Amino acid sequence: MTARTRTRTRRAPRTGTAVVALLLTVGTTGTVVGSAAAAPAPASAPAAGAFSPRVAALLAEMTLDEKISMVHGGATDPEAVGAAGYLPGVPRLGIPELRLADGPAGVRVAESATALPAPAALASSFDDTLARRFGEVIGRDGRALGVDVLLSPMTNNIRVPVAGRNFETFGEDPLLASRTVGAEVAGIQSQGLIATIKHYAANNQEENRFDVDVQVDEQTLREIELPAFRAAVEAGAGSVMCSYNKVGGTHACENEELLTTILREQWGFEGWVMSDWGATQSTQAITAGLDMEMPRGTYFGEPLKEAILAGEIPEAALDTSVGRILTQVERVGLLDAEPAPRPERDPAGAARVAQEVAEAGAVLLKNDRGALPLAPGTGIAVIGPTAKTPVVTGGGSSRVLPESAAAPVDAIAARAGGNAQVGWSVGEDLEGVLVPAEALGAEPLARVGEDAVPAGEALDRSLTLTAPETGTYTLSLQTTGAGARVSLDGQEVLSTRSQFGAAGGSLIATADGWTNDTHYLELEAGSTHQLTVTGDAGAQDLQARLHWVTPSARERTVQEAAEAARSAGTAVVFAYDEGTEGVDRSSLSLPGTQDELIAAVAAANPNTVVVLNTGAAVTMPWLSSVRAVLETWYPGQEGAEATARLLFGDVSPSGKLSQTFPVSEDVTPVAGDPLRYPGVDGRQEYSEGIHVGYRWYDATGAEPLFPFGHGLSYTDFSYGDLRVKDRDGRVEVAFTVTNTGEHAGAEVPQVYVGPSRRLTQEQAVKSLVGYEKVFLAPGQSRRLSISVDDRWLSSWSADDDTWELGTGRRDVWVGTSSADLALHGTVRVRR
C-alpha cells in the first residue's frame, strides 16, 4: 500500500527520534513541485474551481471582514444554547450561524441530552454497527439541540495508563480505534451534524498538555498515533481539531507536516482544521494549514486582517480556509435555500441505544465458581456510594447533563424481586458531616438557606483546622451556584467551580444534589492547618458547606458495610474512579480508601462481586479475594438498568478490554522513564516506539493484570478448523466458533498477525488485524471468514516515506484476547 502522494523528508542527524526539518512534495516524475518553506502562500491551496459553484460565488461576494469572521470564534450566541463556540455567519449572503458543542459521550449544552456510555465502553463492545448507532444518537441530539458542529470524537490512543481522558478514547489499538471512530463519524454526519476529530496529534496526556514537546519517530506516528485520524477522515469527518502540544518542536496547530502534508496531501482531507481552545500560536499558522482559531480571534481576528492588508499573508490563504469551512457547511445542507428543519429529539430511542452500548461494552473480568449471574431470590448487600448516586459520565468538557439516571441499587432491587433482601451500605462516605466548631475554633462553615452568600457578593473565610485524631480524613466542599475553592496551608485542594464550561467538583453529587468535591489527607492528632474558603456568588446565591469524615467515622462505615456483607448471600461492591479533562490520575489505584473497603467486605463475605465504574484501567490488590469483577466503565444514563441486567444474566457480558490493565504503575510502557511520561523540562520522548499497550507486554514479557481483548461470558466458546490463505490480493482467515455452553451469548474472535522477516522496520510480536462480533445460541456453530486489509500488514518506512507490505511467511493467531489465542497458523503473503 502506498500513500496518495509521496513525500521526501530531509532530517537533522538522528538522535534517537526523527526530527522533520523540511518537506518536499514530489510528483510522479520525481521533480520537486512544491515546498514547505515559509513562503507566504496558502498551504495546500485548492486549484481554481476546486470549490463548488455555490461556495466559489460566496467567496467572491464576501468582504474581507466577513471572511475574517468565519475563521475565528468570539461572537455571543443569541440563543445561548450553552455551546462551546459560536460563529455568527453572514446573514446577508445566507451563510448560517454555527454553534459548536462538545460531545464524546453525548451533546454537552445547557439543556439535558442523552448521556451515552463513555467511548471506552463503546470501543469495548467491538461492534461497528453499534458504533454507528451511537453516532446517530449524538447526531440527532445535536441537531435537535441547536448544534451544528460536534467537537468529537476524540481519537487519541491510550499510551499513558493514568491519562485523565482515557475514558474518552477508543483504546490502545489502532485497528480497533479506526473501525470504531469510522463508524461513529458516519453515524454523526448521517444526521447532518459536522463531526470534529480531535486532538491531532500525539495528545495522549493531560499533564503539561499545553506545552509538552512530543518527540515521536515517524513509524510510531504513522502506525500508532495517526491511523484512527485517517479512518475518521476516510469516513467523511468535516473538521479536525489540532492539539495544544508540540510535535517534533512545532506546535500541532501550526505544524505543516501534520496539517498539510499528511492530512490534506496524503489523506485527501477536504474539511477544515480548527484549533483547540487557545491552542493557536500565531497569525502565520493559517499558511501552515490551520483554518479556524477558537474560541476567539486573538490571532485570526484583527491581526490577520492587518497582515493581509500589509501583504504579509495573501488573501488567497484566507479564501482557502473560508472555502473549506463553507464546503462542509454546504455538504450537510446548511447552505440550502431552505435547510432541512431540525429534528425532534428521540429520548426513548436514544435511551435504548445507551442501554445497549452499556450492556455490550461491559467487560466481565473475573467470574469464579459461577458467582455471576446472580440467582433469583439471593440476599444482596449492595455497597458503595456510586450504587446510590451513580457515576454517569466522565469529567471536563465531555460531561453531559442527563435527563435522569437511576440508582443501581434501585435497579438491582427491582430486578431481584420482592422476596429478595436487598440492602445498601455507603461503605465509603463522601459527604460526611459539618466540620464542628471545636475543630475550627470558630463557627462551622454552613452558608445555606437564608445564610447563603447573596448574588454578586463574595465568600472569603479563613479558618484554623485542628485534627482531633491521627489518620486519614476526607475533607469535602459542597456548594450550589457558582461554586467555591478551599486551600489547605496555601495549596488549593478543593474546587467546585466550573471547569471547561462544565460542572466542577466530583462526578458524584451529594444526596441532596449539591456539587461535591473531596480531598483525602493524613493528619496527626493536635496538628493545626490553615484553611481558606473563597468564592464569588455570581448571578445567583451561593450556598457552601465544609464537611469531613474523620478516621474513626470512616472505620465505623467500613465495619457497617462488612457486617451487611456478612449477613447477605452475595455482596456487590460498586467502586469508581474520576477521569477528567485537565488532570491525569495520581495513580492507577481506586481513589480514597476503596481498596481497603473491598478487602474488608471480601473478608466478611467471600462471595463478593465488584462492579467497576471506572473510565480506564485500575489496579486490584483485592482481586484474589473476590469472586467476580464486572467493568461497566462510565455507563451513561441507562447504566443502572444495564448493570442489573448483566448481574442477573438477562444479557450475557460480551465486552472485551480495549486497553490493557496493568498489575501496577511500575509495569507499564511508560513506567520508570520520566522522559516517556510526564516529560522532562517540557520534552517528551515516545522511546517505546510502536510498542504501545499489549505490544509492549508482548515485547518485554511483562504480565498484565488483564490483557487487551480479554472479556468473559456466561457461556463458553470453542474455536477450530483454522484456514488461512492469501487469495486475490488479500489475506483471508477462516475458522469455526461454537457456543459450547448453556447460555446464548456473543463472542469477539480476534485475529493477530506476527512480523514479516522481509521488513527491516521495528515490528510488534503480534498485532490485531481483524475481529468480528458473533452471537450464538447454545450449541450453535458459525464459520467466520475475516479479510485482512493490507494496511494492517504493512509498516511505515521512514527512509522511503511510504508503507511497505510485510510479505513472506507470517504467523496468524485467532482467539479471545491478545494473550489467549487458541488457533495458530501461517500464511505466505505474496504481492
Image (spheres, grey):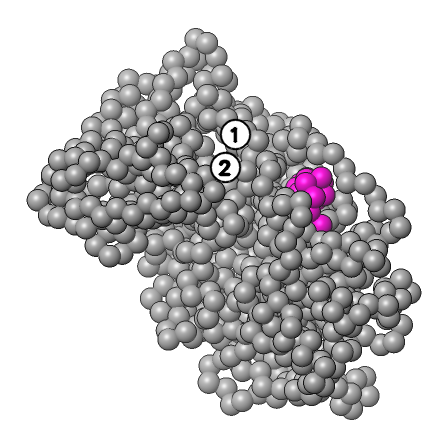
**Magenta span main SS:** helix
Q: Residue at x 84, y 47 (%)?
A: 339
Q: Residue furthest top?
A: 419
> Is disc 2 placed on a helix, strand or loop?
loop
Most foreground residue, 767 or 516: 516
Q: Position of residue 367 (x, y in %)?
A: 43, 33
- Residue that label 1 marks: 405
Tell me if residue 34 comes above or below residue 644 in the rendering.
below
Q: Residue at x 24, y 57 (%)?
A: 490
Q: Residue at x 54, y 82 (%)?
A: 19
- Horizontal arrangement in the rendering, residue 121 relative to residue 558 (left or right): right
Most foreground residue, 590 or 92: 92
- Residue that label 2 marks: 392
The residue type indicated by label 1 comes to: Ala
- Horizontal arrangement in the rendering, residue 317 relative to residue 653 (left or right): right
> Is disc 1 placed on a helix, strand or loop?
loop
Is residue 679 shown to the viewer in this render? yes
Most foreground residue, 678 or 483: 483
Badge 2, how many Cα within 10 Å: few under 14, some, many 20+? many
Which quadrant: the N terminus? bottom right
Q: Position of residue 226 (x, y in %)?
A: 61, 65
Q: Earlier in the sequence, mark 1 or mark 2?
A: 2
Residue 506 is marked as none
Which quadrant: the C terminus? bottom right
The residue type indicated by label 2 comes to: Val
The reply to whether the C-beta atoms of the residues labelled 1 and 2 are less than 8 Å apart is yes
